[in-house]
Each structure stands twice: as C-alpha cells, then as structure tokens.
Image (cartoon, coloured by chain):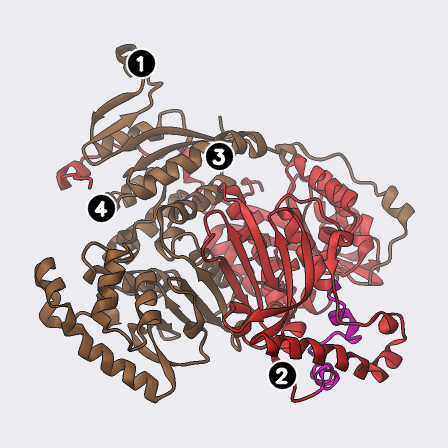
Chain colours: A red, B brown
Amino acid sequence: MITCAPEQVQHFPLRPPMPPHTASTRRRVLAIGVIGPGRVGSALLEQLRTAQARLARDSGLELKLCGVVASKRMWLDCDDAELNARHDGAQVWRPNDLDAFAEHVRGNDGRHALLIDCSANDEVAAHYPRWLAAGLHVVTPNKLAGSGPLPRWQAIRAACAGGARFRYEATVCAGLPVVQTLRDLLDTGDELLAVDGMFSGTLAWLCNRHDGRQPFSALVREAHALGYTEPDPRDDLSGLDVARKLVILAREAGWPLSLEDVDLQGLVPPALAALPRDDFMQRLDELDAPMAAKLAEAHAEGGVLRHVARLDRHGRASVRLQVLPASHAFAHTRLTDNIVQFTTRRYCDNPLSVQGPGAGPEVTAAGVFTDLLRIAESLEARA
Amino acid sequence: MITCAPEQVQHFPLRPPMPPHTASTRRRVLAIGVIGPGRVGSALLEQLRTAQARLARDSGLELKLCGVVASKRMWLDCDDAELNARHDGAQVWRPNDLDAFAEHVRGNDGRHALLIDCSANDEVAAHYPRWLAAGLHVVTPNKLAGSGPLPRWQAIRAACAGGARFRYEATVCAGLPVVQTLRDLLDTGDELLAVDGMFSGTLAWLCNRHDGRQPFSALVREAHALGYTEPDPRDDLSGLDVARKLVILAREAGWPLSLEDVDLQGLVPPALAALPRDDFMQRLDELDAPMAAKLAEAHAEGGVLRHVARLDRHGRASVRLQVLPASHAFAHTRLTDNIVQFTTRRYCDNPLSVQGPGAGPEVTAAGVFTDLLRIAESLEARA
C-alpha cells in the first residue's frame, strides 16, 4: 500500500532523540507495604522477592519492601534516623498500627508508595480513601471495598482524583484478566451489553459433577473434604461471594450497584442459613430434594444446570441456578474453572470470554502483582 | 485479621499529599500519526475521534491527530509556521513521504508522539527501528514486524532501549487480550509451558462445519462467498497467517523463532500452491479426498478435526490439522471464534484461556487503541 524506496529510508533525516524520551529503563523506586501476610500475601511476597532483581535490571523498577502488617504486629524495614539509632538499622517489629505503617511506607522523601491489602478485613478497606487522598497507591484482592457500601466506594474513587491509583484485578477470578479487559473495552469506546459468568470454582465443580448419580449433599461433602469449599460451605453455596464479584464488575461498568441490588438466589434453604456450622453439615441432605428437582428440570429440557452471574445492559444483576442448553459454553468448562463473557456492541455475535482457574494463592498474588506493574509503568522517574 | 478501632482511623495523621502525587488528571499531549487509512485505520480514526473529548476530560490525555498517510499521499494538520503561512493553517495534502510524515508527527517541541501503522506493508515495518530510536512510539496490528526477519525484530527491541514503546496487541487475535496477558504472566514470574490456539476464524469455521455431509471444497466456496476468507482462500488455508501469530507469541515468550522454524502443515496441496487464483478455485475439489480421510480418522477415534497452533516449553512451534478428543475445549468453540490457551507453571492443571472473535476492523482497531492507552498511561506530563 505504501511504497517507499530503500534509499529514502536510509536518509530519513530524524534528529537525535529528545532527552525526555531517552529516560529508557528510567529508574523508579516504589516503596511497598503489605497488609495481611496470609496465603495470598505470602505468595505475593515470594513473587516480589523473586522478581526484584530482574525488574530492577530490565525496567529500572526498584521495589522497596518497607513493611508487613500481620494481625497483631507489624514489621518495618527502617532507614528512619530515629529508629535506626534505636535499633541499629535492623528490622523492627512493633504492635500493629495501620496509621504508623502507612506513614512509614510513604516515607518523607516524596517517593512513590503502594499499600497492598491482602487481608479480608473491612476495617482495612475503610482506610483506602484516606490513603489514596494522601497519595499512596492501593492494590488489593480484597472484595470488601469494591462490593461494600456504595458511599465508601465513591469516596475511594473520589480520592483517586489526586493521582493515586486504586487497582483490584484479583478481586474477580484471581489472576485472570477480567477487570482490565472490561476497562479496556469501555475505555476504547465499546458499550457493554451483558456480563455472564461463573465466578465460583466451587459452585462450578458442584454443578459439573451433579448428574443425579449421587445426592447433591454427597458432592458438597466431597468438595468440603477436598478443600474445594470454604470451612463453612455456606460461604460458597450462598452465592454471596459471586454476587460481590458481579457488583465489582457492575461498578466498573458505571452502574452504582450494591449487594442488595443483586437478585441473589443461593443454594442454602432459608431454614439452614442461620444454623451453627455443624448443625448445617448434619442437615445437608435437605439440599438434595430441591437440587434433584432442578436437575430433573434441566434434563427434561435437554440442558445442564449451572450457577450463573449475569449483568444486563440496564444494570440488572442476578446470581442464580439456571438451566442452559447443552451447547452453551458454560456446559463445557473444565471442572473448577471460572469463566466470564463480555457481550458488547463490538462483541455482539460472539462474546469475548476469559476462562481458567479463578482462585488460589499463587494466581491471586499474580493478579495483584500485575496491578503493581501497571501502576509502576505509570510512575514518573523519581529517586 | 487486622483490628483497628474507628477512632484510630479518624486520627490517622497522614501529612497532606506531596505535589508530584497530585498531578491527577495530569495533562498529557500525545501527537498521533496514522499510516494506512484502510478498514482498520478508518475504524481506528473513528474510535479516536469519538473518544477524544472524553479522554481529555476524564484523564487529561489530549490526542492530537497530526496526520494520515495513505498509499499515494499524506494529510498533515499543521501548526508549523512555514506551512501555516503558505496554507493559511488549513489541512495540507502532500505526496506520500514517510520520512517527512514521522518528522511532522514528532514535532519539535519535545512532545510525546506515536505512529500507528495500520498498513500491511513491509517497507513501513522496516522504518520501526529508526522511529523508535528517535523516540517515537509505534503501535501496529501489522504482523510483518513481529513475524518477519529476526534481525529486524531484534533491532526493533534494541531501539526501544531509549524509552520509546512498541506495542502490537492486535497482531494476535485482534482485540482479544492475548499479548498483554502473556506479558503479564511472564512479568510476574510465571513460566510458560505451552501455548495452544486456533488463530484463524476461517479455519475454525471450516473445521467446525466439516462434518462429512458436504465435501470440504463446498465449505471453502461457501466461506469464500460469505467473505469469511481472504480474496484468495489459500491465504487462510496455507496456515501462514496462523504461523505468523505463533511466531509473535513465541518471541514474546523469549524464543528467537522465525517463520521457517514453525512446523507448518497447511491445507493447500503443493500442486495447487503456485497456481493462479482462478485455477486454484477450479481445482478446489482436490482438497476433498485428503480432508475426508482426515475426518474419517477423527471420527474413528471419536474425536474432532481442528487446525491448531502449538508452542511447547522447548520453543518448538507447529501449526497443523489435529484430531482432538470430543471433550477438548477446541471442540466446543463458537463457529468463527479464535481461542488461545496459556499453560504455565501456575496455570498447569487448567490453562488460562481467552476466546472470541479474532478479526474485523472494529475489534482490531480497539486492540490498537488499547495499546495507545497503555502507552499514554506511562507518559510523563509534558505540554
């Protein structure tokens, strides 16, 4: 289409590069504090330690781990003069104090600073607006901010106006590229028509295995024994966790939804919802008759039973057991896979879908790490 | 896990934000030149025009379209004093001159500048190293750089050392998040064990429809009539385009592959490869016997026939017709969908997969636009 003689190329008269462009592997320091060194937090710390030298060499990014907060105490890596004097520059353990922790990570030299919340704690999420307003970036796999009270969510978004970034890819399907993919669709001007997904590996496994040969309760017991469910299986069966993920995606798409707006149909009969866990496990077979009836309905229609989250173009959100045709993509997922489908104006005949394992410490930590890298890309060079 | 009394939160003593953090919707200007206003280029220009006001308002990003190069001439939007004097500040058409075009887009005020190559022209790709070395960012859906001669690819990568960015998400499966997903896996320290994919909507459609009820040639003629194939169907059937995408992913993963390294088994018998197109179309039924034999083989094994690209952990790449079990994910894709599966150390039991339409001007342009936004995020504020 374009013709251009080689000699023209040879004599292309570009002036030498401008200084600002040549800041190549421009050195950037990112101070990091990790809140909650549980399974995800520990996996993340390990990933960061392994990557540290490579990132510094290949992209000029220096990750400076400044502290970790656990449930009762916190560890600070100090070059603070006073502390150095008192502790000989060594690592310092102190009682847990989130305020002092954030202040420490932020430092007083105008450096870039990031707090990573790997706790599942609502009190920590309550700090985000003030941290962000104070210029600290925040990354989290914690769903409590994204699906919690709307005013707090709005305060978080407002607090980002100062330039600090809040990212939460790992809140939905762990390391799978879901939130960023939706963001990119919207930012490039596409229009979201629907989100359909299976956001619970546990419920996917149960639905995949529920073929009538065993009562549903036997499958729940098996999943519980295999560690596929939370310690209290109702935390999966209620669908609440799935609804949280759907709220996060809905808000990303601009719908000011709250959990109460989701038409949530879980698998726990109301009579069993409030029982102590052991009593619930005793009465698990009360799930069998309703689930067998649902399955018979699916079979009668030649379809399959799946637990599906859906957001439509009007912002209506539902999480429920559904009969799907046997040809539906959700009928052919691998056992515990998560899947999300975005139907948009551009992807209207066939949706864009992302599928894979949507839980686990390593992949969740990788989702957090990806957010960290995305923030690091946007940092200006600063010592 | 972490307890923190509300009053503690209220009195959190963060100092006011540092000035560098508050550069919020920091104003950034990105000068853009588009090369090749064909179907993808036109769709992109439309998307950029639609998004322009929103991006400026919401993120401080000002896209400044400075010119478009078509096959014979180029349009420049000038605020260059000399040209202004001669043309009264109006838009200027001139004969196609890539050298002058790049110089014009880059400007002389140290601004950020991006060239978007929507041509399918190898001569344009030959310019990338020098443009990048001169500080111009380059984004393209053009596969010729990523899958072309290795020394040129290496020159392109080397030219990025100065800080200019080269991005090419849309070269593989158009707007689907494939290259970035692989990048993120690797950058967060995961290890790639395999890539499996179907990167041709045309070949996917042909394999999906090829059930023995019609000869394969009839399906090719139908796809041709529907516009699913290139004007010369051999451009799809050869598998060359698929091999190019696999080479791009292999290089992304660090394997210095070239097209010749791919074990490429296309569907065009050697005797038909060099014929004029009309003669080839006349002799299309020579594909029927070998394809029927392959299908019989698949049926005998209870499987399906799919055209699959594969890269293994040792950097071995193949593109070929394969018999897959009926339960395989590739047996259940929607008609013309592309799919890519990444098997990694972290995603080893079940792969991470991305699926959806992998061609078309709108989604390809959106992939380019996403790259543009990713570059824009990393720009330092500059007038």
The answer to whether tags 3 and 4 share a subunit is yes
Label 4 sits on what residue type? Asn
Q: Is residue A167 above or below residue B2?
A: above
Q: Quadrant of the N terminus of chain A?
A: top left
Q: Which mark is residue B121?
A: 4
Chain letter of the residue carrying label 3: B
Q: Are marks 4 and 2 in contact (CB under 8 Å)?
A: no
The CA distance from mark 1 to mark 4 is: 31 Å
Q: Is residue A240 above or below residue A26?
A: below
Nearest-to-viewer mark from 2 and 1: 2
**Magenta residues (range):** A215-240
User: In percent of the image, x 50 and y 44: which residue is there?
Assistant: A190
> Which secondary structure, mark 1?
helix
User: Label 1: which residue?
Assistant: B84
The crowd level at tag 4 (other Cα within 10 Å; few <14, some 14-19, many 20+) is some
Q: Is residue B337 left or right of residue B128?
A: right
Label 2 sits on what residue type? Asp
Label 3 sits on what residue type? Ala
